[in-house]
Amino acid sequence: MGVGWLERMLGERALAVTIIVFTHKNVQDFGLGDLKENNDLMNLIEMCGNRYLTCKRSMNDPTEISTVLEQIDLMVSTNDPCCYTGEMYDEEIRKRQLETDWGDRSQSEEKTLSVPGNLPEDAVANKEKGEEMRLEEIDGSLNENNIPENIQLAKVEELMCRLHLKDKYQDKLTTEDFLNIGSSAQHQHEPQTENKLAHTFLQRLLMLDYRARYIPVREENSEMHDTNDNRSDNAETEESAFDALFNKNTVSGDIKRNTHVHPMDVQMAVFHCSDSFLRQFMVTKLSLCQYALPLLVPNPFTKEIECPLWTFRQIRKTWKSTNGSNMVTSQSMPIYKAETRMVSFFRLGSVSSSKSQLMNNLINQHHSTFFHRHCPGSSKTCLRMDGVVEIAWYCPVGKPNDIFTDCVAFCNLHGDAIANEIQRDILIEKASVNVILIPSLGKGDKSMAIVQELFKSSKPLICLLTEEDSVATEKKTGKYKMGLRDRNQSDVSEELKGIIINNLSRPCRSFKLEDMAEDSGVRVDEDDEDCQVGKTNALQIKDLLQEMELSKIK
């Protein structure tokens, strides 16, 4: 049938903008009642939102033509987006390609995944039932940890395609690609299409635009979203307020708004597709814009955890420390050499409070150092931040309103710390103070085993309970409990600051960025062959210059 062909070629969303028209020679020859007895036909009409019309085959009746136009106006005014677009078609093609790739992979793994013929029937049934349950869990969960590796990989590949970076993971981006001055530089502050997001982000970042992450996305059909008064008086329906607001089966609910690419997905996609020099350039600019920097990064394709230590080599921090006698000491050094206290934040399980937003309140209330769920452009579909550890430094200026009197590093583990065991263990070991966000837990929960180990440790521990509303209390020496539910964020921040300041004033472990190269289970970018050869050559040139007199060099 024609409608079936439309659905196969254009996707299911095409049916929301489809009207079925029955034509006839004359009214006497047309029996609509007979058609309604045809179940297949009625199912077809229902697929198209129960939109159908009848008219003469000659199409010469002005009244019938007016009815057709009114029905079209009604359909357009109630849909969001109002019509089928090229963007929807491109998305359908991408989806179809992913399904094809997934089918090819499934066929290639058929031998290893097939059920042996000598298994009993009930075992086969249990396997099939288990597969169905697993797929239902995947479908109903937004947690990336529950998604099988091959589906994760397919989603990453789709993201790279949307950003036009598919071929750049092997053929890396360079600084030369983004230092060109062209016509695109004049329009970088305007809304952009998805295929220009990566280029616009880097250009704005290289110009030290602190709003580089917040790039509005241009929709091709944005001018068609106004549905206030488009329908005529004759097209008014008897739709109730309840149906209009809460009925998910209405026509306007059949089409979902396209989900924009998450701003942090853009940043991490560019990071993974950049060569070493562009990465260092990018991280240096992120630091100058007062953004958190990637410290531990899981590779989306190899699953290795990388510490991009070389990207920090150009970053220099300056701060003024104040001692107990109110004596101010100024310090300035490359950040990889600085020995500072470090406060680590991570969560166990799914929590309702925003950890990143809480950290911003501690460091700088006027700037989102750590990107969080309430930042412009944020969405639930962030793919590339799970398992990433970001780091930022608080640098005091020697004034009475300084929050901390010395330089302090803050590390933020994105995602569930239960699933990201390597990153979690590194942070726990390196931190001076550990802060964990946890929901309500049972005594036998896996998360409680981690909390129990932290309670036995001599390091200060702050447990933020997202389902309790209690004030901060010290349960034992160095172990604190604080509720977050229904509490004023300002009060929570002040209590948390007080506890951290109190514990950092005592003797505790210092953190040095250069020591990250000693951690097992983490690949350091400086260990790569190209980086080692470059370092050797640089040291040779340095030694040659040191043996020569300055006047002869000139």
Image: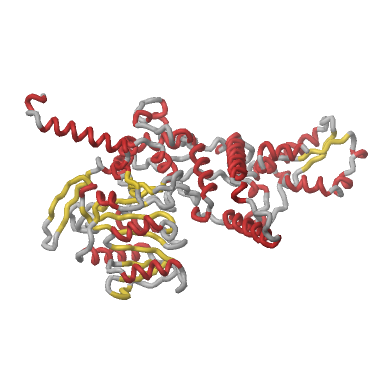
Look at 33% across and 53% down and name the residue there.
520
The relative height of residue 530 versus residue 183 in the rendered view (above or below) is below
| Residue 519 locus on image (x, y percent) | 31, 53
| Residue 539 locus on image (x, y percent) | 19, 35
136 relative to 366 in the view: left or right = right
| Residue 507 locus on image (x, y percent) | 19, 65
Furthest residue to the bottom?
Answer: 475
Look at 67% across and 51% down and name the residue there.
250
Q: Is residue 262 visible?
A: yes
Q: Nearer the viewer, residue 188 or 321?
A: 321
| Residue 416 locus on image (x, y percent) | 44, 58
453 relative to 341 in the view: left or right = right
174 relative to 500 in the view: left or right = right
Look at 69% across and 61% down and name the residue there.
120
Look at 22% across and 55% down and name the residue there.
340
Q: Nearer the viewer, residue 514 or 6?
A: 514
151 relative to 6 in the view: left or right = left
Q: Quadrant of the C terminus?
A: top left
Q: Nearer the viewer, residue 391 or 510?
A: 510
Q: Quadrant of residue 503?
A: bottom left
Number of numbered discs visible in the structure rendering: 0
